[in-house]
C-alpha cells in the first residue's frame, strides 16, 4: 500500500502534560522531521504546542 507508506497516521501529544492527543496524517517526503502544531488543549482550555509522538 503506497498510501500508508507515504502518509502515515501520527499522534500529536500535548506539551502541557495533560495527555490530550490529536490524530492526523503527514507526508513523510515533505516533512521528515517531527511535526509540531499549535492546537487547542481542552483540559487546560488554551492553545499549546502538540508534538508528534511515535
Image (tube, helix red, strand yellow):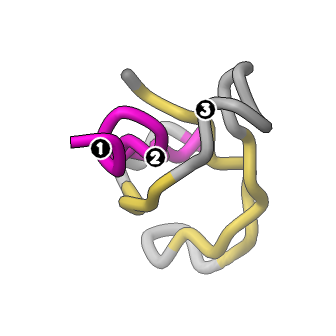
CA gap, disc 1 and disc 3: 10 Å
Going from N to C along the chain, the mark reached first, 3 or 2, is 2
> Rounded to the nearest whole Å, what is the CA distance between mark 2 and mark 1?
5 Å
Which of these two is toward me, 19 or 35? 35
Q: Mark 3 highlights which residue?
A: 28
Give SS at disc 1: helix
Q: Residues within 10 Å of mark 1 (few under 14, many from 20)?
A: few
Q: Are marks 3 and 2 in contact (CB under 8 Å)?
A: yes
Residue furthest front in the image: 2
Few, some or many residues within 10 Å of mark 2 (<14, 14–19, 20+): some
Point 61% across, 45% down: residue: 27
Whether residue 9 is situated above or below residue 30 in the rendered picture: below
Q: Is residue 23 left or right of residue 46?
A: left
Q: Position of residue 19 (x, y in %)?
A: 34, 46
Asked if disc 2 and disc 1 are in contact, CB closer than 8 Å, the reply is yes
Residue holding disc 2: 7
Query: Residue sitting at 70 percent across and 22 percent down?
Result: 32
Q: Is residue 9 left or right of residue 40?
A: left
Q: Which residue bears the numbered disc 1?
A: 4
Q: What's the residue at 60%, 79% (across, down)?
A: 45
Residue range in magenta is 1-16
Measured as percent of width and height from the top left, residue 8 is found at 38, 41
Amino acid at each position: 500500500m503506497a498510501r500508508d507508506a507515504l502518509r502515515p497516521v501520527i499522534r500529536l501529544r500535548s506539551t502541557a502534560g495533560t495527555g490530550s492527543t490529536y490524530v492526523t496524517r503527514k507526508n513523510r517526503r515533505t516533512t521528515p522531521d517531527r511535526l509540531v502544531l499549535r492546537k487547542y488543549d481542552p483540559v487546560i482550555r488554551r492553545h499549546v504546542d502538540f508534538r508528534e509522538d511515535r
